[in-house]
Image: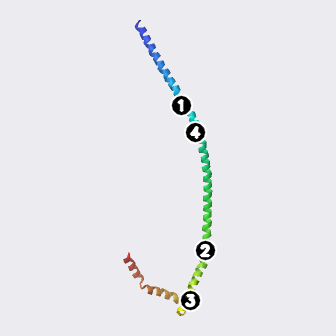
């Protein structure tokens, strides 16, 4: 055997080994690709029902949001109506109630004066007298009140 023959045998052996390694790699790659396809199929089979359930949940949530929006709108309208009604009631009742309170206050003061034996005082003097009496009863002037408040603080 010559050197060329030995070289040919070595080259053939190396090529055969490379082909064997390549074949094993292709077999492993094919096996991995089959597993990947099976996993993708299983994922598809499980994902479709989940996506349908999610779509149904979103549709139900949309319906509930619309319902809540209608409730909030109704509550706002009702609040406006109640606010308007309370304003009207306050306007309607305020004047008669104030007049009735003023009348009852006047009657009670007149009854008290009659019991005490006082004579009726004209309205213009009564107001001035009441103011003077209030200041006289306090015993303080506006500057004294200010000084007292400052000292108390």
Nearer the N terminus, badge 1 or badge 3?
1
Observer able to see residue 87: yes
Nearer the N terminus, badge 4 or badge 2?
4
Q: Is residue 42 above or below residue 85?
A: above
Q: Residue furthest left?
A: 151
**What residue is pinned by disc 1?**
36
Residue in the picture at 42% in, 9% down: 6
Q: Which mark is residue 111?
A: 3
Element at badge 4? helix
Q: Is residue 66 above or below residue 120?
A: above
Nearer the N terminus, badge 2 or badge 3?
2
Gap between marks 4 and 3 measured at Cα? 90 Å
Q: Which mark is residue 91?
A: 2
Gap between marks 1 and 4 measured at Cα? 16 Å
Gap between marks 1 and 3 measured at Cα? 104 Å
Nearer the N terminus, badge 1 or badge 4?
1
Nearer the N terminus, badge 2 or badge 1?
1
**Crowdedness near tag 4: few (<14), some (14–19) or many (≥20) residues, C-alpha within 10 Å:** few
Q: Is residue 36 above or below residue 70?
A: above
Residue in the picture at 62% in, 60% down: 74
Element at badge 1? helix
Gap between marks 2 and 1 measured at Cα? 80 Å
Element at badge 2? helix
Q: Position of residue 27 (x, y in %)?
A: 51, 23
Q: Is residue 98 above or below residue 61?
A: below
Q: Is residue 115 left or right of residue 8?
A: right
**What residue is pinned by disc 4?**
47
């Amino acid at each position: 055997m010559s050197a060329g023959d030995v070289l040919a045998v070595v080259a053939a052996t190396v090529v055969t080994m490379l082909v064997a390694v390549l074949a094993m790699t292709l077999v492993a790659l094919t096996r991995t690709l089959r597993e990947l396809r099976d996993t993708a199929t299983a994922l598809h089979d499980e994902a479709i029902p989940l996506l349908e359930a999610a779509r149904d949940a979103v549709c139900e949530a949309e319906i509930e949001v619309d319902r809540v929006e209608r409730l909030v709108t109704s509550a706002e309208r009702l609040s406006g109506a109640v606010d308007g009604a309370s304003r009207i009631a306050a306007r309607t009742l305020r004047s008669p109630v104030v007049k009735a309170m003023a009348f009852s206050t006047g009657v009670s003061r007149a009854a008290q004066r009659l019991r005490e034996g006082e004579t009726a005082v004209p309205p213009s003097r009564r107001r001035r007298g009441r103011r003077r009496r209030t200041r006289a009863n306090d015993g303080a002037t506006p500057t004294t009140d200010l000084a007292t408040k400052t000292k108390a603080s």
